Amino acid sequence: GDSVTQMQGQVTLSEDDFLFINCTYSTTWYPTLFWYVQYPGEGPQLLLKVTTANNKGISRGFEATYDKRTTSFHLQKASVQESDSAVYYCVLGEASSGSWQLIFGSGTQLTVMP
Amino acid sequence: GPKVLQIPSHQIIDMGQMVTLNCDPVSNHLYFYWYKQILGQQMEFLVNFYNGKVMEKSKLFKDQFSVERPDGSYFTLKIQPTALEDSAVYFCASSPDRGEKEVFFGKGTRLTVV
């Protein structure tokens, strides 16, 4: 079945550092890919979305590009801030037989030190 | 922005008892979901619900689980009877429809079975 892999469980950076979080996916369909962010005590919220129609998503300084050849959807940000500390989930949208669900990766805890 | 409300935020219950988790989805949304997150672990899909019916459920959605949304009121997840392994945070979510739409999550209900 469809799946999402995030190998980095934790990332610790200093303010203004460059952020790169790996994500690879597996699906037999044309993917719809998302990055969701979860702050403490909150539910996940959409950060950005990419479909096969537009292979790059940009939001709040974060960007992710969908690469069909490598089946990757890495998240990047040029300069992180302390307020970016949160858990980041790479998410694959799966449609089958009239159903729709989100498949979450295992998440990457980002900690940004002041 | 749109809000999904979950009631209660915390629930402690004796093993074997019944519990109902309540969710007030975003107004006019048609597609509803429950996800389970054990502390520090992955967000895992339980079930989705559309037009009064379960569309898809995962292996985690045991026979003791049920969902309903009677007459447009709360979307509920009922567990009867509860087991120790049901302790987790349960997130309700909703989307305007199925497909490549943003899914909005609530803050979760932390269920502790003792």
Image (cartoon, coloured by chain):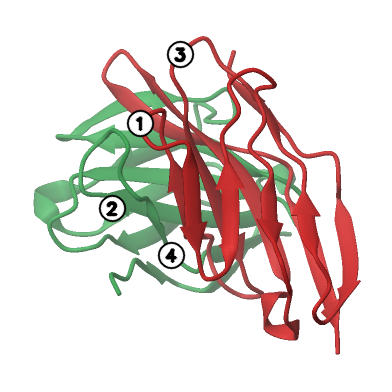
Are circles 1 and 4 on residues that touch, CB within 8 Å? no
Residue B82 locus on image (x, y percent): 59, 45
Badge 1: residue crowd in 10 Å (few <14, some 14–19, many ≥20):
few
Residue B112 locus on image (x, y percent): 67, 62
* Mark 1–mark 4 distance (CA, rounded to whole Å): 29 Å
Q: Secondary structure beneath disc 1?
A: loop
Q: Is residue A15 above or below residue A9?
A: below
In this rendering, do the residues under marks 3 and 4 share a single chain? no
Q: Amino acid at mark 4?
A: Gly
* Mark 2–mark 4 distance (CA, rounded to whole Å): 12 Å
Q: Amino acid at mark 2?
A: Phe
Q: Which chain is green?
A: B
Q: Upstream in the sequence, badge 3 or badge 1?
A: 3
Residue labelled with disc 3: A29
- In which quadrant is the N terminus of chain B drawn? bottom left
Residue labelled with disc 1: A53
Q: Secondary structure beneath disc 3?
A: loop
For the view shown, which residue lies furthest in the bottom direction? A114
Residue labelled with disc 2: B75
In this rendering, do the residues under marks 1 and 2 share a single chain? no
At 52% across and 30% down in the image, what residue appears?
B61
At 54% across and 60% down in the image, what residue appears?
A44
The residue nearer to you, when weighing B28 against A31, is A31
The residue nearer to you, when weighing B86 against A65, is A65
Q: Amino acid at mark 3?
A: Trp
Q: Looking at the rendered structure, which numbered label has been put on residue B46?
A: none
